[in-house]
Image: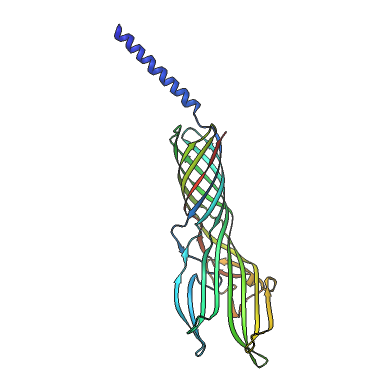
């Protein structure tokens, strides 16, 4: 009888403890709806060769010009590689807890990549450091994306780790390219030898085709208040982007004609954005160029003539990746 009483007391104690624990778990159960704000920085992974900038390859070239023979020699050359996955990102997410272990999220993010050197070509006079010409282009990406995902976590009351997997759908984006160029040359005007100095500043915007990417993250949530959490996470994104069309949005070309004896400016020639032909200003990308493509037929200085100057020119599609590996930190409000 004594043993039965002891067993009954122990059973009631365990049962009471289990009931209280279950009640605590019910009180601590996650809220159904939550909102997250986050910011982070990403690093590029799996770098590839950058796309061409007009007729210029993604190379860093150093050249030497021999004025006696009129020949140009390549001194050094290297391929420029990287990706547009390095940069900062901020976002707003809306989540819904299906149960204690699974949630679904819908995030909207803004991304701004760091600037990348896309092409550079420097030409100097042979035997000196006198620069005769230089072309240098840098590009960066701005984008807004929608990222639906599933979040899986063990549902711990305190420190709660989680895994998030899903897709990335860019809603808007553009690759912006800025090019600065300069060139020194010679010409004959009215039977007199003169020096020409041309400077060009050009901005281009490349619009992408619709694409879908992948996202995956591992993070940890720390509660700091009744309805407020802090989270940190590491995230990987893979978002390949294919070019659709390009537009020159700003253009300034100035050529000064100088006296070869005094160095004084004799005349100035200028071309602006409105002076460009439709083919120079607009480009439509194709997978294959053929005899029907509107390609360049000649070039005089910086002026390019196409088969049909009144229509957009054609060029081969290029590919970039705006995904990367990075870290985020943010706040989560539970409602």
Quadrant of the frame with the C terminus: top right
Residue at (63%, 72%) from the top-left corner?
280
Q: Is residue 34 above or below residue 288?
A: above
In the picture provided, is 191 more to the left or to the right than 127? right
Looking at this rendering, what residue extends furthest in the top direction?
1
User: Image quarter for residue 132?
Assistant: bottom right
- Say how many tags the image has: 0
Residue at (39%, 14%) from the top-left corner?
12
Residue at (68%, 71%) from the top-left corner?
273
Colouring scheme, one of rainbow, by chain, secondary structure, one colour = rainbow
Quadrant of the frame with the N terminus: top left
Residue at (44%, 76%) from the top-left corner?
76
- Residue 262 visible to an observer of this rendering: yes
Q: Give x and y (percent) for residue 83.
A: 48, 60
Q: Give x and y (percent) for residue 223.
A: 49, 35
In the picture provided, is 68 more to the left or to the right than 312? left
Q: Give x and y (percent) for residue 65.
A: 50, 84
Q: Is residue 35 above or below residue 113?
A: above
Q: Is residue 108 above or below residue 224?
A: below
User: Image quarter for residue 289?
Assistant: bottom right
Q: Give x and y (percent) for residue 70.
A: 51, 88
């Amino acid at each position: 009888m004594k043993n039965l009483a002891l067993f009954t007391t122990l059973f009631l104690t365990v049962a009471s403890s289990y009931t209280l624990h279950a009640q605590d778990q019910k009180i601590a159960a996650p809220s159904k709806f939550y909102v997250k704000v986050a910011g982070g920085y990403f690093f590029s992974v799996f770098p590839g060769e950058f796309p061409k900038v007009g007729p210029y390859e993604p190379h860093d070239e150093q050249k030497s010009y021999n004025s006696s023979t009129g020949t140009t020699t390549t001194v050094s050359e290297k391929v420029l590689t990287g990706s547009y996955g390095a940069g900062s990102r901020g976002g707003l997410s809306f989540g819904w807890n299906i149960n204690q272990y699974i949630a679904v999220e819908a995030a909207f993010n803004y991304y701004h990549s760091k600037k990348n050197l896309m092409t550079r070509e420097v030409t100097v006079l042979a035997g000196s450091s006198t620069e005769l010409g230089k072309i240098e282009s840098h590009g960066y990406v701005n984008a807004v994306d929608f990222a639906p995902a599933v979040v899986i976590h063990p549902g711990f009351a305190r420190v709660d780790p989680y895994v998030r997997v899903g897709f990335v759908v860019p809603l808007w984006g553009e690759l912006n390219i800025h090019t600065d160029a300069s060139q020194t040359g010679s010409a004959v005007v009215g039977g007199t030898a003169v020096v020409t100095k041309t400077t060009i500043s050009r901005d281009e915007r490349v619009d992408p085709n619709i694409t879908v990417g992948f996202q995956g993250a591992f993070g940890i949530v720390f509660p700091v208040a009744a309805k407020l959490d802090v989270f940190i996470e590491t995230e990987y994104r893979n978002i390949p982007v294919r070019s659709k069309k390009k537009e020159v949005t700003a253009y300034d070309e100035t050529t000064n004609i100088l006296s070869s004896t005094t160095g004084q400016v004799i005349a100035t020639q200028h071309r602006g954005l409105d002076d460009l032909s439709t083919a120079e200003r607009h480009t439509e990308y194709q997978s294959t160029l053929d005899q029907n493509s509107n390609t360049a037929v000649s070039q005089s200085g910086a002026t390019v003539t196409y088969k049909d100057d009144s229509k957009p020119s054609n060029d081969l599609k290029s590919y970039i990746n705006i995904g990367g590996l990075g870290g985020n930190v943010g706040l989560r409000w539970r409602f």
